[in-house]
Image (spheres, rainbow, N blue to C red):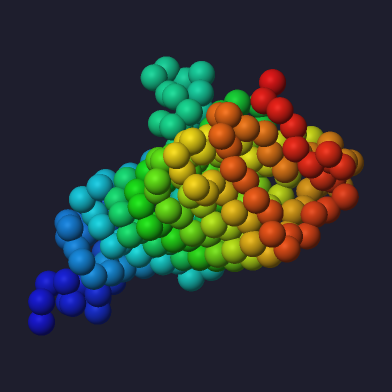
Amino acid sequence: MSPARAQQASPLVVAANGSGQFLTVQAAIDAAPSQSERPVIIQLKPGTYREKVTVPATKTHLVLRGTDATTTLITYDDHVGMPGITTPTSCSMLVQANDFTAEKVTIANAAGYTAGQAVALNVEGDRAAFRHCRLVGNQDVLLLATAGSRQYYQDCYIEGTTDFIFGASIGVFDHCVIKSKKNSFVTAASTPADQDYGFVFLDCTLTADTALAKKVYLGRPWRPHAQVVYLRCKLGGHVAPTGWDNWK
């Protein structure tokens, strides 16, 4: 049996309580084979993994798999304003590799409501897929970073305050729940002029904390050619009648 097939058959198991092969998510990623052409499964046992996680470009075809997103949490609390931290580097998880998949995992930034920009997930690689995941934070939660990168989010829960889905990539959100925690903006796309698509929301549900009333905007353009489309989505009463706003 080839190493790639053996790896696919025997997941790398991560457990915060010591019952797996690895104590941290990063240790399992580091141990995974590089430049794999087949899925390499990392199984996360329930627990809280407080660490900054990087999936480098060499770790292709990784599958990060939890059993329940509500009990499997990757979290950190970096934010802009800390020494040496920028918006992209504030992320709790950075995905640079192509063909990355995450399933049934929560990725959070716990910096707090007033911390400013604090990214939970920063995706730079191409052909990334997230299924049944939770992306949680406040401002700038999900950064779809790279122009031309294609990303797919299916049955995910994403919550934040301001511009919490933002960036230049092509992102499809399929049957996701998008929750606003503040009267602000859901998206801030920076779609390049030569890119046909930006963010597409399909059959999603937009919700909010009950205190919000018709003051949440679907998006504002981070760059002049921003493209965001909502198709067959359920828009709650918190969404402003005008729908969109300008960058201010």
Quarter placement of the N terminus: bottom left
Residue 71 visible: no
Q: Nearer the viewer, residue 178 or 189?
A: 189
Q: Position of residue 244 (x, y in %)?
A: 75, 37
Q: Nearer the viewer, residue 120 or 38?
A: 38
Q: Position of residue 101 (x, y in %)?
A: 39, 62
In the rendered view, would you say 125 is above or below 190? below
Q: Nearer the viewer, residue 107 or 62?
A: 62
Work out which residue is located at the far bottom of the displayed protein and give it. 1
At 67% from the left and 34% from the top, the residue drawn is: 220
Q: Is residue 163 left or right of residue 9?
A: right
Residue 100 visible: yes
Q: Is residue 78 left or right of residue 25?
A: right
Find residue 128 and report its image quarter.
Answer: bottom left
At 83% from the left and 53% from the top, the residue drawn is: 236
At 58% from the left and 37% from the top, the residue drawn is: 226
Please state the total of marks drawn on the protein image. 0
In the rendered view, would you say 76 is above or below 27? above
At 44% from the left and 32% from the top, the residue drawn is: 88
Q: Position of residue 98 (x, y in %)?
A: 31, 54
Q: Position of residue 103 (x, y in %)?
A: 46, 65
Quarter placement of the C terminus: top right
Q: Is residue 80 left or right of residue 10?
A: right
Q: Is residue 50 left or right of residue 235?
A: left
